Structure formats: structure tokens, C-alpha cells
Image (spheres, rainbow, N blue to C red):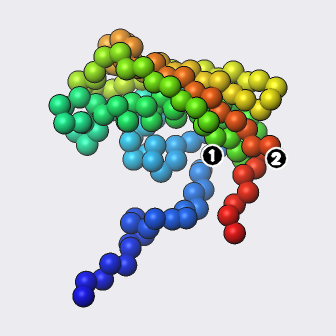
Amino acid sequence: MPDHTPKRSESTGPHEVVLNQWISCAPFESLLRMKIIEAENCRATLTMPFLFEFAQGAGFMHGGALISLADTAVVMAIKSNLSPDTHFATIHAETKFLYPVKKGIVTAKARASFYEDRTIQGVATVSDENGKPVLEFKSTFKIARDRQIKKPV
């Protein structure tokens, strides 16, 4: 009988992730080769190359990869205005695809707005290598009541 013991990279969790810095790419974001260009004052700019592995069946950049870039850009804009280790999570997201991406490096520019009830609104626009907007993204986040999400026991 074959050994189906998961290797470390095949483990289904739970996973302990330790980031080098508060504003840095997590494992999934690194897998997608995202780069943080800037993140300050509730704004962020990130880039990501369109690699073959990110293509969908028609040869365009996969929508999920584009959404991941937009979402991560908003997260970095949020982190630029929160103290390290503050926990927050997406509670709503909305995406509008404008044009397909055929090649090059895409750029996400995001901004975040904070409200008194621990709610954060985020918006991002992803553009192709020529600066043409290809995706619009809106999201809502909530900061954990105690600023920390309790770990499962």
C-alpha cells in the first residue's frame, strides 16, 4: 500500500505563519510573486507578473490571481494604518472585471478608509502594463473586537 503521509508542503494545516515584517508578503502572495512597491498612509501599490502558471484556459490572466492582487493591495493599505499584529478580516468583496490581461506586469493601487465601528472600506484598481484599468475591487473589513483573533485550541 502506498504511503499517503502528507509532506510539509502538502499539509492541510493548521499552519503557523510568521512574517518577517508587519507589511510583507504572506506565503500565498509570495507564490504569486507579488511585490509591495509602497504601503503608507492608507495607500498601497503592489505588482505581480503574468506568468504562464497564472493563465486560465483561454490564455488570459486568471481572474482569481487578479482578485488576489487587488485584495492584498487593500490589506497592505490597511496595515499601513494599524499597529502590528492587529487582526482584521474581509467580510465583503465585490469585483468588476473590465478587460482581460494578456501579458506583462499588472499593478494594483489601493486605498483604505477607517470608520469608528471597527469597519474598514477598501478600494483597488488593477491596471495592465500600459496603465489601462482591467479590474475594480471594493471590499469591507472588520477589525477583531479585541484586536486579536483567538487561536483554536
Three-letter code for the amino acid on which mark 1 is drawn: Gln
Image coords of residue 10 (percent x, y): 39, 66
Q: 55 or 39, which is in the foreground?
A: 55
In the rendered image of this protein, does residue 52 appear above or below residue 138? Answer: below
Depth check, mark 1 against mark 2: the one in front is 2
Q: Which residue is mark 2?
A: 146
Please give the name of the residue rendered at 40% of the width and 65% of the height, measured from the top-left corner. 9
In the rendered image of this protein, does residue 128 appear above or below residue 81? Answer: above
Query: Is residue 64 visible to the viewer in this orientation of the structure?
Result: yes
In the rendered image of this protein, does residue 92 appear above or below residue 138? Answer: below
Secondary structure state at the residue bearing disc 1 = loop
Between the residue at mark 1 and the residue at mark 2, the CA separation in whole angstroms equals 21 Å
Secondary structure state at the residue bearing disc 2 = loop
Image coords of residue 141 (percent x, y): 65, 33
Please give the name of the residue rendered at 69% of the width and 60% of the height, measured from the top-left corner. 151
Q: Which residue is mark 1?
A: 21
Decide: few, some or many residues near mark 2? Use Cα within 10 Å; few <14, some 14-19, many ≥20: few
Q: 20 or 127, which is in the foreground?
A: 127
Q: Is residue 100 left or right of residue 133?
A: left
Three-letter code for the amino acid on which mark 2 is drawn: Asp
* Quarter containing the N terminus: bottom left
